[in-house]
Structures are given as structure tokens and as C-alpha cells.
Amino acid sequence: MRSNAVGSAAEYGRPRGRPPGAAFQRDLRAPAPPQLPIFRSRLQGELLGRLLLGPRREASMLDLAVMLRTDLGSVMREVERLSRAGVLALRRTLAGRLVSRDEGSPLYEPLARLVMLTFGPAAVVAEEFGRLPAVREAHLFGPWAARYAGLPGEQPGDVEVLLVGDLGRETAFDAAQEAAARLGLPVHPVVRTPAEWADDVDPFLREIRAGHLHSVVR
């Protein structure tokens, strides 16, 4: 499809009367990696993670391709599939088409929850920090931990991570930068040694313990 094609669901010619998820379900018939059977591909999952999680935002196709470290054509095909399904919204501007989530879609909330559990901050933080030998534990705290606990609220704009282990702050920062690049959200690591985490005198750690914790590495 040409890159200047109009982007709304109606302009893609979705037949009237078809449920908003029909195109999405049809596209899911394509083979998927065995570890990710729910989504068509890892690219689709990460694209949805970028757009369905965190504050609502618009992005160009090119920006998404750069963020996801893939080619423009692949991003355009995935966006067009999800737009036809009523999951994403496209807006034409003089600079090109911008894509965002369609919060009015009946698919938005349940799909965002599913994406959070499979491609969200917990999964990305577990991958990026779990590969560091010095990390003994990693926990989300703050608003994202509350969302994983099922508490309602706005989509958080950043990710707070408690790391327990004997690792340097520079190492933690590098891993946080990689996680942030994948999520499109700032990731703030807090590093404590096992002895400091076991100690109950730090007011900041007491505050963390008193709130929600979502363990991702243990």
C-alpha cells in the first residue's frame, strides 16, 4: 500500500457491520512465534506496547521504525492492520500520518491489559536487568506496580525499579537506558545492596515496602 494512503478505518474500506476486532483476528491467523502465540509477531507486540501503554501519544511511522529498530515497511503494515481492526487511530497531517491508540475502541482496555502483561514494563525490566549477574532482585514500585496489582488509574509516565544487588550505578543506568528505549518511557533505577534492603531503617525503603511491589527478578 502506498505510503500516502489515507489512514482511518473507514477509509480503509472496513465493511459496515463487521465487529471492530474482525481484522485483528484475521491477521492473527498468521503463524506466530511459539513463545508469543497471542500476537502475530514480536514486532506487533512491541508496537502495541509503545502505543497502548503510558500516556497517550502520537508518533510518525518513521519514528516508530527508529524506536523499534526495524524497517519502515514492516511498521506501516502492522499499523495498517491494527488501524483496520479499530485498535489504532491514524491522523493525516502535512508532515505525514501520525498514529496513536484509539481509546474509544472497545478493544483498547482489555488489549492494553494484555499488552502490559506480555510486553510491558515488567517483561522489559526483567529482560534487561535479569541478564546482569549482580542483580539478585528487581521490583517495580510506584504506579506501575499498582497497575500490575489491578488498581485502576491513569497510565504512568515513567517506570520506577528497585534493584537489589552489588552492582554499580553506571551498570544499572546503562540497563535502564536500554529498557527506556524499548518502552518509550523513562526508567528510574534505585540500587540497594542486599544488606541495605534487609535493613529496616531507611525511610525511603520503608515507603517502598508500604506500597505495591511487583517482583520481576528474584
Image: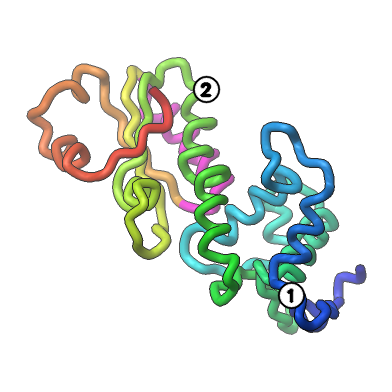
Report which quarter residue 64 is drawn in.
Answer: bottom right
- Circle 2 sits on which residue? 131
Res 199 visible? yes
Which amino acid does the dot numbered 1 rest on? Answer: Arg
- Residue 32, how many percent across, how many down? 77, 41
Question: Which quadrant holds the C terminus?
Answer: top left
Q: Which residues are magenta?
A: 167-185
Report which quarter residue 78 is drawn in.
Answer: bottom right
Residue shown at the point (46%, 40%) measured from the top left: 122
Question: Which quadrant holds the N terminus?
Answer: bottom right
The verdict on residue 186 being magenta is no
- Circle 1 sits on which residue? 97
* Residue 8, above or below 45: below
SS for callout 1 = strand
- Left or right: 214 as drawn, with respect to 46: left
Task: Give neighbour class at mark 1: few <14, some 14-19, many 20+ (Cα, 10 Å).
Answer: many
- Left or right: 75 as drawn, with respect to 56: right
The verdict on residue 178 being magenta is yes
* Residue 86, above or below 189: below
| Magenta stretch secondary structure, dominant | helix
Front-lying residue, 210 or 17: 17
Real-space CA distance between mark 2 and mark 1, rounded to the nearest whole angstrom: 37 Å
Front-lying residue, 132 or 148: 148
Outermost left residue: 201
